[in-house]
Amino acid sequence: GGRDFGSPVRTNQYGYAVHGPKKASIVNSSTKPVRWRLLDASGAAVKTGRTEVQGTDTASGDHVHIADFSSVRKAGTGYTLAVGDASSYPFAIADNPYSPLRKDALDYFYAVRSGTPIEARYAGDAYARPAGHLGVAPNKGDTDVPCLPGTCDYSLDVQGGWYDAGDQGKYVVNGALAVWQLMDSYERSRGQGDTAGLRDGLLSIPENDNGIPDVLDESRWETEFLLKTQVPAGEPLAGMVHHKIHDLAWTALPTQPEKDSQPRYLHPPSTAATLNLAAAGAQCARVWARYDAAFARTCLTAAKTAWKAALARPDVYAPSSSSVGGGAYADTDVTDEFSWAATELYATTHDRAYLSRIDTRITSAGFSWRDTGALADLTVVRLPSRFPAPMVAAARKRVLAVADGFVRDQRAQGYPNPSLPAGGVYVWGSNSVTANNALVIATAYDITHRDVYRGAVLESLDYLFGRNALNQSFVTGYGTQASHNQHNRIWANQIDPKLPTPPPGSLAGGPDSALQDPVAQQNLVGCAPATCYIDDIYSYSTNEIAINWNSALAWVAGFTADSAR
Ligand code: 9MR
């Protein structure tokens, strides 16, 4: 306890949609409603009302009131909400506040590309940098990377892809989930007839004038890397996929990618990584068929080869002990990866052999890089014409039931997080749980077009943009008090003021109640779960950036931008 989170009046610090819910969460011990005033930029009251007493919020311990000013539909900037002497940070009301976020959250991926110079004309001067990990001294990777000593006798060219997070490792299971979300966002836009997200020219990337949707161009950058991680034909484990590639030891903060002198190694293949390539490869084949048939075929061949290899070796697990120089991304249950991969392969090929292997369902546990079973139902719902009708009906029902649960969890809290984990535990990357659950709710909206779901997605963004127990926006550049010291080696402004902060649209991991790094352990002892967060570059367990978190944010931002009215 004892930390001061500023004003008790907590709003989305960025902006509310003109046609959407507009609510604030107010910490106030009164058991009776209190008066609120909505002020415009000149300080004039445009609306007043009384709060509803929500009660004690379990995740934070705060006694919370809700102010509802949804009926205000005048676009503008510099609004504030006042209660007594306290005032919120300023915020906007806008027709489509999340259209810039879609671009920023997706441009993030260009900024973390490996193996290519990041050019000022796309990323801006502050974020331009030389190519990293092209085997140019002092780099030792990634053009000719050997296996960990004693694990194989070949080396692979695994240049390209995205850096995973604050470290510069590249991990297949996390890369595949992130790239799935980008391609899924594309497939969602296509299925819904939303054209804005399909634009060539949407992003600031070198491919933004090639006649292909930029979201696909960006996904291809990672997919090309994933394809390189497959064990070549003729080797004993041919078709399997290397779990990861990263430095021998953790590098210092900051370390620019092109200055990294650590040797990098391929870590042994895993069934999980193999099935992740099967899933993402099958999806790649589908989405690229109309733009680049040859690339689509390459993806499909890799996916089918991976699937067969996984069937032959269904229980090769990456060790949880392997967390020096890179994360472990360990997972000892791959039944969910089999089901997800089978779903993607069936959707692309219509080969009935895959159908019987689709056996996971979406549950209130949602999904993550480790738990991919829910993605089977989500893909079935996204692509109804590609699956048997009874399967689609059943998947829709389950998605709606799970989404209803997330909406209930959101309503039950003082702050609108659509995640209310059992025991009040906030996990490493909790903000990605928030965004992933919002994706499920958004999918329920796509099925039903019921306003309650769209509103719940918008309120989930309220949570991420400051309507929370910390009075903190978790997205760089969005809000007055926004995270900007996220754990990463490239944009370490907190350590070296000559370096920039992470680019706008970078999502922090968020509260992690297990206090899994020294800075969290020093500063956050006794924190209520929803407050176990610190915007400090050394707090990797609460404040890292990661591709799978930004992919979730980008998906949700795309949905909200497309569903604006
Ligand atoms: O996102 C991962 C989270 O689920 C795990 O609990 C955590 C500890 O194993 O690792 C997270 O992933 C990190 C990875 O291991 C290394 N690169 C940075 C990732 C984000 O923090």
Image (spheres, rainbow, N blue to C red):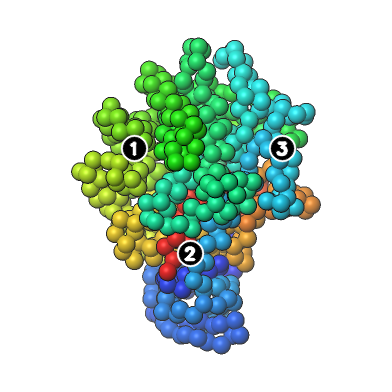
Task: Return the residue at label 1.
Answer: 347
Q: In the image, is the residue at mark 3 within 8 Å of ligand 1 by its beta carbon?
A: no
Ligand 1 rendered quadrant = top right
The residue located at (69%, 25%) in the rendering is 263
Closer to the chain start, of discs 2 and 1, is 1
Label 1 crowding class (10 Å Cα cut-off): few <14, some 14-19, many 20+? many
| Residue 339 in the figure: left or right of residue 502 | left
Tell me where residue 238 appears, x and y as whole percent. 48, 17
Task: Return the residue at label 3.
Answer: 131
Amino acid on which disc 1 is placed: Ala
Question: CA separation, marks 2 and 1?
Answer: 35 Å
Task: Return the residue at label 2.
Answer: 462
Question: CA separation, marks 3 and 1?
Answer: 37 Å
Tag nearer the camera, 2 or 1: 1
Quadrant, the C terminus: bottom left
Q: Secondary structure at mark 2?
A: helix
Tell me where residue 398 appears, x and y as whole percent. 27, 48
The residue located at (29%, 46%) in the rendering is 384
Q: In the image, is the residue at mark 2 within 8 Å of ligand 1 by its beta carbon?
A: no
The residue located at (73%, 50%) in the rendering is 120
Question: CA separation, marks 3 and 2?
Answer: 36 Å
Quadrant, the N terminus: bottom right
Closer to the chain start, of discs 3 and 2, is 3
Amino acid on which disc 3 is placed: Ala
